[in-house]
Amino acid sequence: MGGERKMEDATRDTRVMTPDEVAEALRVSRSHAYKLIRRLNAELEELGTLTVPGKVSRGYFLRRYGLDGAGDERL
């Protein structure tokens, strides 16, 4: 029984964001979040990066939307 909980925690990957997380971060609908994830994943694929459908790299998402704290330095 305890192993089930451990497995669930292990499958959560903080390196990627789900549509729900993207929707919450940008205050958009879940369906729009899916569209944004598809767009970001297409950009990553053009750069030769492997992607997972329905999820997006947290670091890439934060950089692309200026949420990584580096946005102020670019201005």
Image (cartoon, rainbow, N blue to C red):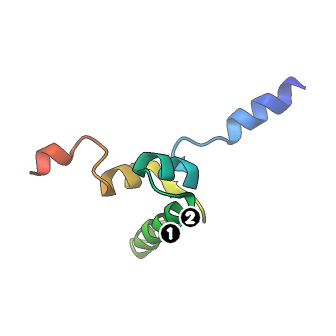
Under circle 2, the secondary element is helix
> Quarter of the image holding residue 51?
bottom right
Q: Amino acid at mark 1?
A: Lys
Q: Amino acid at mark 2?
A: Ser
Q: Are marks 1 and 2 in contact (CB under 8 Å)?
A: yes
Q: Is residue 11 left or right of residue 40?
A: right
Residue on which the image places disc 2 = 31
The answer for how far apart the CA atoms under marks 1 and 2 are is 7 Å
Residue at image point 40% right, 54% down = 61
Q: Is residue 21 left or right of residue 68?
A: right
Residue at image point 70% right, 33% down = 9
Dot 1 alpha-carbon crowd within 10 angstroms: few under 14, some 14 to 19, many 20 or more: few
Numbered mark located on residue 69 in the image: none
**Residue 62, relative to residue 38: is it above or below?**
above
Residue on which the image places disc 1 = 35
Q: Is residue 50 visible?
A: no
Q: Which sits in the foreground, 46 or 16?
A: 16
Q: Which sits in the foreground, 64 or 19?
A: 19
- Position in image of residue 3 (x %, y %): 84, 28
Q: Is residue 7 left or right of residue 17?
A: right
Under circle 1, the secondary element is helix
